[in-house]
Image (cartoon, rainbow, N blue to C red):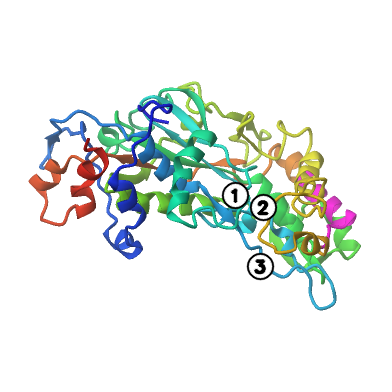
Amino acid sequence: MSSSDPKATTRIPAGFDAAWGYPLMEAIFKRRTRRIALGSEIPGGPTQFKSEKPPLPLDELEEALLVQAATGLSGLNLADLPFCDERGRDMGGNTMIQFAGRTWPSPCASHDTELFFWNDEGTYVMKLHETTPDELLLYETQDDRDQILEFHRKCAVKLFDGRPQYPHSYPTMLPFNIPTSDIPGSTIFLPVADTTFELINVLLLMCGWPDGGITLVDPENGNRPAGCERWVAEGLLNSMYTAPISYFGRVSEIESGFIIQNLLLAIQAMGLGGWVHAHPTAMVLLGGTPLAKGLGFRFVTGKAGSTQGMPSPVGLPEILEAYCPPFHPSMDAAVDAVVEAKFGSGGLYDPQSESASAFANRHEVVSGVPHYSDALVQCVKDICNYIYETYGRFPSHVDAISTPGCWVQAHHLDLEFYDRFYKKGAYTEAQRDHMTLWHSA
């Protein structure tokens, strides 16, 4: 998705193979923030600079390699964890949500984060959550690398033309970022996470321990059980093990950090410039104010008087929809949807499903995976309903849809700036040779 014609014959430049073979340790230790792009400017001060070269957008292959390194499918995960103990009791291995392997690790392989990105031409999202590969390793040989561009063209969904609308000014943005952030010629990458699927999944895990699950309590209401009194009394939950309802809501947020690190290392390996920096206020960027459309997410507002009564993003229809109202009719339905994805017809642990896995005998393994009891499912529904009814939103203390507070920008460097103001070593051979390796005729 770039300025190049996707139907044109794609020339594979020498830089592609050079980036693929770039030493990992060099990428780690030579990674630096390099902000000054072709066509950019520092308006004043001791490093005042105006690039004399026009902006040069990343081409389609450059963007595709960055996107796939950041969040692409890499094959099938191993799910090599115990499902039962020596007595045949559930050990929680069924917390695994997907058999798809991605380029970044995810709690319970939930992969609840999708990568949004944009350039001068348009704004896109890689919609991959329901995609499962057929092979254990997708990039096993050099010939497999052709899939990078094919997969990119297949899975990148265009949302609208151009870049998202938001005030490119203070206080929406930090003043020192404004001159060089989201500028013409650059590509911006923004991970956006759904926290709700994994939160429900974690509740099913934590409330289902064989010797008594954890009792969820509400610290803002006297540490009383959060809708689960019945299950403490019946022995499903152990009152000696307690945790506040706010404790588990941030599990999925770790995913964005892995995606960002992948991007930064790939930027270095490819010889591009780039940096990670604070993005505009999430409420503005996602579209929760009258200031601008942003990315166009839908918001809900918690109950008035609640400490969590601020607007919260809940999803982008048909792209990233949280497991809560309004995208599910009730919290009961949201919990049922999570359980169905794992144990329903065609689900991850359906022995009759033909979906791929890394197991040599998929049928035998998944047939032995314990199912959730009706009591456990109802317990989690009661907790989720308590949260939604008490706070008017789900989750209570974390947004249903979250951003990491920062994004990654990739661009072509203006090396003249670094030659003028810095000692030798401000950029590496990869940056020095990028234009020759990637863009020579």
Q: Give the structural element (helix, strand or loop) at label 1.
A: loop
User: Dot 3: few (<14), some (14–19), or many (≥20) neighbours within 10 Å?
Assistant: few
Name which quarter of the figure residue 388 lies in.
top right
Q: Is residue 304 left or right of residue 168?
A: right
**Lower position in the chain sequence, tag 2 or tag 3:** 3
Residue at 23% across, 52% down? 430
Instruction: Report which residue position mark 3 lands on.
Output: 80
Q: Is residue 181 left or right of residue 334?
A: left
Asked if the residues shown at circle 2 and circle 1 are in contact, with their CB atoms under 8 angstroms apart, the answer is: yes
Q: CA distance from mark 2 to mark 3?
A: 13 Å
Instruction: Indicate which disc residue 111 carries.
Output: 1
Three-letter amino acid code of the residue under disc 2: Gln
Does 371 appear in magenta? yes
Q: CA distance from mark 2 to mark 1?
A: 8 Å
Q: Nearer the viewer, mark 2 or mark 1?
A: 2
Residue at 75% across, 49% down? 354
Three-letter amino acid code of the residue under disc 1: His
Instruction: Report which residue position mark 2 lands on.
Output: 98
**Lower position in the chain sequence, tag 3 or tag 1:** 3
